[in-house]
Amino acid sequence: MDGRMSIGRRIFFLLLLTGLVCFAAVEAVSFFSLYDVQRHAMERGQEMGTSAALFAEEVADEQAKKRFALYAEEKARGIATDFSRLREDTELLAETMTRILTHKDDYLPRELPLGGEAPIRSKEPYLLFVPSLWADGGIGEVLPEAKIAAGAADHLSLWAGSYDDSHIMTCFFLSERGYLICVDIAPEETDFVKFAEDWYASSYDPRTRPWYQEVKASGKSVFTDIYVGAEGYPCISCVAPYYDENGFAGMASISNHIGSLYRQLSENTIGNTGVNFILNKKGEVILSSEKDG
C-alpha cells in the first residue's frame, strides 16, 4: 500500500513539475514574444518619428522656397511697375514734343530762364544750351525753335510733380540742335537746382552719350545702364525719340536717381540677413540692398 502511494505521489509530483515547467516555458515564450513585439514597436515608432521629422523638414523647406519665390516675384513686380511707369511717361513726353515740332504754327514762343544764369527752383522748367553753341555763336540760330519747344515745359513740370518727393530726378528734352529744356526735382533739403561745372565744359555734349546714339539709331525707348550724370549722382534713365517734319529731332528723358530705387529695394528685406538685388541682362548685379561687398 505504501509502495503504491509512493508511486502515485511520484507520478503526481512529476505531473505537477511537468505542468510547472510547461507553464514556465509558456510564460518565458510569452515574455520574450512580448518584449520582441515591444522592441519592434519602439523601433518602428522611432523610424516613423524620423520619417515624420524628415517629411516635416522637407515640407518646411518647400514652403520656405515658395514663400521666398512669391516674395521675390512681388518685389520684382513692384520694380517692374516703376520702370513701366518711367517708360510710359517718357514716351508720352516724346509724343508731346513731336506734336509741337510738327505743328509749330499752333504754338506761341515761350521764354524760359536760362539755367546757370538765374536761380532755378526745384520743379521749375529752364533752358540750357550745349557749350559748343556758345563757342561758335549758334545760339541765335536755334533759339526760335527752342522758344517754340518750350511750350512742352509745363508737361515736364506736370510729370515731375506726379512723383513723390522721395524721388530725385531730372526730366528733360534734348534737341538734336543742341538745346535742352529741363525740370529737376532736387533733394528735399535743397530749394534750388545746383548746376554741375561739367555742364559748362567745352567738351560737354550729351548728344555724344551712348544712350542718345542708341535711341537715335533704334527709334525706340530704351533704358540706360546706371551711369553718373552731369549732376554728379548715379542714375538710370529712360529715353525716347521725338521727331519734327524732317525726322529725328531729339529725345525725351526721365533720369531717376538710383537712391529712389535703392530705398524701395531695401524695404521689407527678409530678416536681418536678407538681401534684395537687381540683375541686368548680362547677369551682373547693378543694384543691391547691400551697399558694401
Image: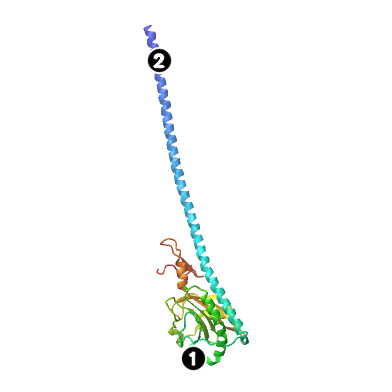
Residue at point 49%, 61% (across, down)? 71
Q: Quadrant of residue 101?
A: bottom right
Disc count in the image? 2
Between residues 285 and 19, which one lies in front from this camera angle? 285
Residue 150's x, y, as percent?
Answer: 55, 85
Q: Is residue 220 visible?
A: no
Residue at point 42%, 24% (across, down)? 23
User: Label 2 is placed on what type of residue?
Assistant: Phe
User: Which element type, helix, strand or loop, lies under badge 1?
Assistant: helix
Between residues 262 and 3, which one lies in front from this camera angle? 262
The correct choice, above or below, for 105 with respect to 79 in the image is below
Mark linked to residue 208: none
Mark linked to residue 12: 2
Q: Quadrant of residue 105?
A: bottom right
Residue at point 52%, 91% (across, down)? 139
Residue 148's x, y, as percent?
Answer: 57, 87
The correct choice, above or below, for 101 with respect to 30 in the image is below
Mark linked to residue 134: 1
User: Label 1 is placed on what type of residue?
Assistant: Trp
Q: Residues within 10 Å of mark 1 (few under 14, many from 20)?
A: few
The answer for how far apart the CA atoms under marks 1 and 2 are is 137 Å
Position of residue 35 in the picture relative to residue 97 (left or right): left
User: Which element type, helix, strand or loop, lies under badge 2?
Assistant: helix
Q: Tell me the quarter of the image containing the N terminus.
A: top left
- Of badges 1 and 2, the one in the foreground is 1
Q: Residues within 10 Å of mark 2 (few under 14, many from 20)?
A: few
Residue 182's x, y, as percent?
Answer: 51, 82
Residue at point 57%, 74% (across, down)? 88
Q: Which badge, 1 or 2, comes first in the chain's sequence?
A: 2
Q: Quadrant of residue 263?
A: bottom left
